Image (cartoon, rainbow, N blue to C red):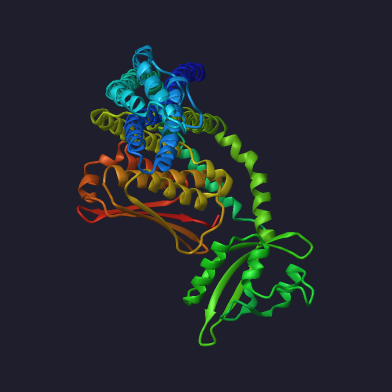
Amino acid sequence: MAEPRFKRLEYLYLTALGCIALSIIVSQILIQTSISDQQDDARVINVAGRQRMLSQKISKEALKIGQDAHVEQARLQLSNSLDLWKKSHEGLLYGDTTLGLSGANSPTIMKMFSAIEPRYQAIYQNAMALLQDTIPSLEKNILVILENEPYFLDGMDKIVFQYDKEARDKVYQLKRTEIYLFVISLLIIILELIFVFRPLARNVRTTVLELQDSEEASKKMASEMSKLYEELGKSYQDLEAVNVTPESPSVYATINHKGNFTYFSEKFMRLMEYEESSPPKSLQKLLSINGYKDDFINGLMNILKTKKSWSGEIRLITEPGDFCWIETFLIPVMPSNDIKLVARDITEFKEAKIRSRELNIERIEKSVKEHNYRSSLILEGQEEERKRLSRELHDGVGQMLSAMKLLLESIIVSSKHMQMRLEDAKSLMKGIIQEVRRVSFNLTPSSLDDFGLVAAITKFCDEINGVTKGNVEFINETRFINRLDSPVETNLYRIIQEGVNNAIKYAKASNIIVRFSHNINTLNIVIEDDGKGFDYERVERTGHFEKAGHGIFNMKERTSYIGGVFKIESTPGTGTKIFITLSLDK
């Protein structure tokens, strides 16, 4: 039912989006057309105003010809002015591409031009007569020009004012049209909020409530399975009784202070099946050719430079291409500054553990099959519901909100009051998008299954920093890289997620640090914040943390489920520290 509901809302949203897009396109067309028209109007007004100046110039040059002073020069100037005057007059009437005139005049302006046409013709014809070499009636021609000039100037003044009035009318009409389109866009957005986003929020709220109910059911199931977990623990202890015993650690190689190998043991050479000339020259090269990333290699070298030891399981590829696992201890030796690579081959041990687990899995499943089946269905249903809801929020709601934000940003208004309201709407939409992104990411850690716990926590901290004001930092002190069982990684991720979210939401922390450190036996996780803190002992005495649904209760339950140890320290005003210790010796 949820999928058709979201689809129906998506169709309504796309329809509304199309209407808004259409209104924006129409608005842009009108604005661009108006800008072009205003440029044409400005050019027309400029040419019309120049006609007044040219008519006065023609009169002055006609008088110069009548005074017999520099007649040839005056005639040349008169000819140039007369040509430009005629070209501009005809361009205003009929259009001229060279002058940028369209000739699209209103009936009122055409009527005004008709009124001054006799004056124009009289001035033009008599001015042309003055350009002749023999002028029988010079004074008469000048007199006619001077008599018609004031009437022509008055008429051109009226035409210029009419051009200006019509240009202002166009601007006013554009403003009215812009307001209409803005109101229509806002109306569509309001209808969209009522008929799309409000039902969408209702559906999301319903789905979240269903998810919460499912989670409560799983918590009840957890209490019923406590005895079965004990039996699982005993079964896992049986796995330790594997016949294969790992060899004792021994020195495999010596590394100088630059990271270069200076010695390889015969055991290491046989294990890797190296020829005499084939061993890698440096530790960095060995790790690099075996697929380890530069950030891990650089971090490991920095740890060794500080004279600290490092331990961990390293997977290597032998010369023929087979995989092998070695339990590695990198130990600085003073005062030579060399580093001893002490290790043992645990390939057979790890494979034996896997074989032993496979042999015992049938017996384990017989004892927990019914409860485990129901529990797994609930947990899988929760995770699937989280993923589905996350996809709907990210791909559906998130995309729609982002498109809405772009639409709001594309709306152009001239009113300051409208601009303030529009900026408020943009700010609100930005906050909604950030919240949707945060909720979507918190619902499902997509990178957990693909890349492991460290990568998922790194991405989680980056995402939280992108949508909140607090600073969340992840520090992997000992470069922990081991993959854990999928349930263990999922529960650790949820514990860290709960701790960070509590620090942001309730403790109002500004800085939060998630810290990983490990040795060969244990993984230590610390979640530290500088928030408000609380009196932990007093609240614990009240039994507040024993209530199902409380964040700390959930974290305790998840830690207990994966066999870890949970501890919390907090005092008012000094922040909170959460410690999770998990055994890796399994």
Query: Is residue 562 visible in this depiction of the protein?
Result: yes
Residue plotted at (51% across, 47% down): 489
Is the residue 451 above or below the residue 141 in the image?
Answer: below
Residue plotted at (64% across, 47% down): 357
Residue plotted at (45% across, 21% down): 103
Which residue lies most toward the front here? 136
- Image position, residue 386 (x, y; %): 47, 32
Position of residue 102 in the picture relative to residue 452 (left or right): left
Query: Is residue 244 visible in this depiction of the protein?
Result: no
Q: Nearer the viewer, residue 556 or 58?
A: 58
- Image position, residue 312 (x, y; %): 56, 64
Q: The C terminus appears in which quarter of the rendering?
A: bottom right
| Residue 40: quadrant of the picture | top left
Q: Nearer the viewer, residue 206 or 432?
A: 432
Q: Nearer the viewer, residue 68 or 245?
A: 68
- Image position, residue 268 (x, y; %): 71, 72
| Residue 408: quadrant of the picture | top left
Residue plotted at (21% across, 42% down): 542
- Image position, residue 557 (x, y; %): 40, 42
Q: Nearer the viewer, residue 63 or 397?
A: 63
| Residue 468: quadrant of the picture | top left
Is the residue 112 above or below the residue 463 in the image?
Answer: above
Count of number-bearing discs = 0
Position of residue 395 in the picture relative to residue 191 (left or right): right
Position of residue 362 in the picture relative to residue 152 (left or right): right
